Amino acid sequence: MTSQSSLNWDPVLLISQILSMQTLHYLTLSIFIPPLLTLFAEPTSLAYEGGASNVGMIMDWREMAGRPTVRGIYDSEKWGSYSWAWSGGKILGFIWREDQLNGGMDPIRGWIIAFCWILACATDIYYLYILVRRPRLILDFAITLAFNHLVLTTYYSSSFPTSLFFWGVVLAGTAMTVIIAEQLCVKREMNEGLNVAPVRAQEEEDLDEMELGQLLPRRD
């Protein structure tokens, strides 16, 4: 039976649930992402970005979007977008900065991280089912998790996410989590209600029999 503290607004319980959901989500990502990147991502570009266990694979939205993570590639000035090639103290020509960083970009890596994000959202269904339990709170916790990640990835990358692919993956994962978790929690509450109803009916029947027995005259 649900405790009274969980029925009322409990800030300590609420904060602990939010922190638990966020921690479990990132823990799940840290379990899925490194081995899948090691198996399927391009090794050279992966090493250029710091390896499969780099925290940026989870916290940097540009990794999922397939964008370069090195700052200063795209400058506002026309002459800042390329650099000169020198040899023996002489200028031989110039090269675009994008050409210097082709080794760090791998579109497959972004798809792998997106797939791992969806897997993590699928496991969030179980976490919400166990930790939150109440159907009307599922949407709030799922949105809070996505919002917290948005704040953290913006802080980590020092840039607001502008990739439609990133937004699509995050929103799709959140929608899947909310829909399935709510359905499971509602189904559990309905089953618990059906289990309680026969017990209450039997108690009422026993009470009626006791009252009827008191009204009938006793025969010695």
Image (tube, helix red, strand yellow):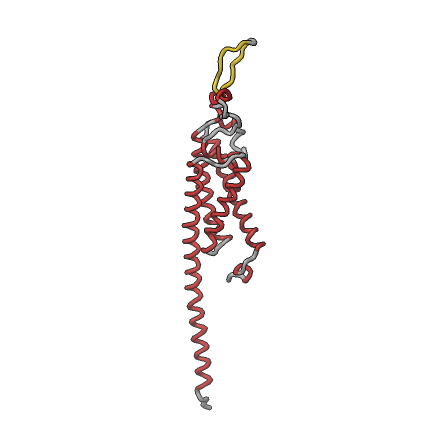
Q: In this view, does 92 lie above or below 109?
A: above
Q: Position of residue 186 (x, y in %)?
A: 42, 57
Q: Position of residue 191 (x, y in %)?
A: 42, 60
Q: Where is residue 201 in the image (x, y as percent from the top left)?
A: 42, 71
- Closer-to-camera residue (11/208): 11
Q: Residue at x 54, y 29 (%)?
A: 50
Residue placed furthest toward the bottom: 220
Q: In this view, does 132 lie above or below 41?
A: below
- Closer-to-camera residue (2/97): 97
Q: Is residue 9 found left or right of 111 in the rendered image?
A: right
Residue placed furthest toward the right: 12
Q: Is residue 100 found left or right of 12 in the rendered image?
A: left
Q: How many labels does the image show?
A: 0
Q: Is residue 55 above or below residue 202?
A: above
Q: Position of residue 198 (x, y in %)?
A: 42, 68
Q: Residue at x 48, y 17 (%)?
A: 95
Q: Which residue is drawn at 46% across and 77% down?
A: 207
Residue placed furthest toward the front: 77
Q: Residue at x 45, y 28 (%)?
A: 106
Which image quarter: residue 190?
Answer: bottom left
